[in-house]
Amino acid sequence: MQSFMRPLRLSAAEIEVRPAQRSDQAAIGDLTENNRHIHFNLDWWTFEDWLYPDRSSDAIWIAQHDAQPIGVVAIPIDASPVAWIRSTAVADGYAPPSIFEALINYAAPQLRSNGVQAVVSVAYPEWYADLLSATKFLPVVEVISFRKEGRSIPDPTTPAAANVLTRPARSIDIPAIVANDRAAFDSVWWYSEKSIAHVIELVAHFIVAEVEGQVVGHAF
């Protein structure tokens, strides 16, 4: 027979929130690896990218109860006016809503002071989608994923592709890639020059498409 403990529902007054320190790295690892309520959307970043040796983090916040870490959220500022929740986690035995709300409320003034007008997140998994809804997040867009069967690629010699040159992206392309990004997408999906530079160094493939020497597309 299994038994279940009712999750502890804390009030805002019982939750202490503070910026994460480099010394919190083990606690963050425990929260995001050893509990059930975990959300990840780190892409090409790690928590270490936002934990600094000489100052508090400006992207990760820790929630505590009785001096014990019980929650974490990572919201790095990239391309204002939008900041993405890259990860959040709540310790087992605690009800997530009040902890998540305390973390968001604590981070909000710093985000606003840096020009952030909206905080967005991928609503996955199901518990996290319910949590976002319960804390007044609103749906923006439905993301649909496609899977390609087989490894065939389009023929680059077709008339439609005759004037298009594709090649590996270079660091000199970054401003054009960012301009292309902003022309193609709503601000929710923008990448900064710093992020594009980071991605180029990490992903297996990053290509640009040129027409008459102008970057008109990119993929990675």
Image (cartoon, grey):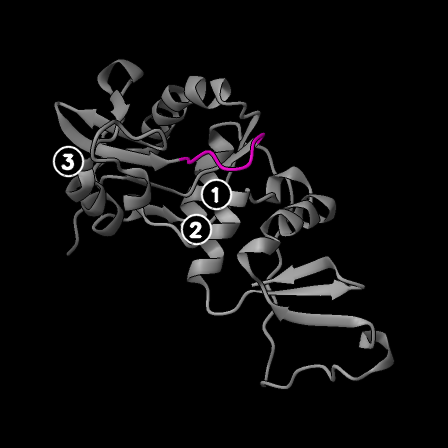
Q: Position of residue 136 (x, y in %)?
A: 52, 27
Q: Position of residue 175 (x, y in %)?
A: 62, 47
**From what the image shows, is residue 126 above or below residue 14?**
below
Q: Counting other residues with Cα less than 10 Å from the Cα at mark 1, is it few (<14), some (14-19), or many (20 or more)?
A: some
Q: Position of residue 200 (x, y in %)?
A: 49, 59
Q: Counting other residues with Cα less than 10 Å from the Cα at mark 3, is it few (<14), some (14-19), or many (20 or more)?
A: few
Eye-nearest disc, 3 or 1: 3
Residue shown at 71%/58% (left/top)?
Answer: 215
Q: CA distance from mark 1 to mark 2?
A: 6 Å
Mark 3 near mark 2, Cβ–Cβ under 8 Å? no
Residue type at tag 2: Pro
**From what the image shows, is residue 121 above or below residue 18?**
below
Q: Position of residue 218 (x, y in %)?
A: 65, 60
Give the extent of the magenta segment: 75-81
Which residue is identified by label 2?
A: 125
Mark 1 near mark 2, Cβ–Cβ under 8 Å? yes
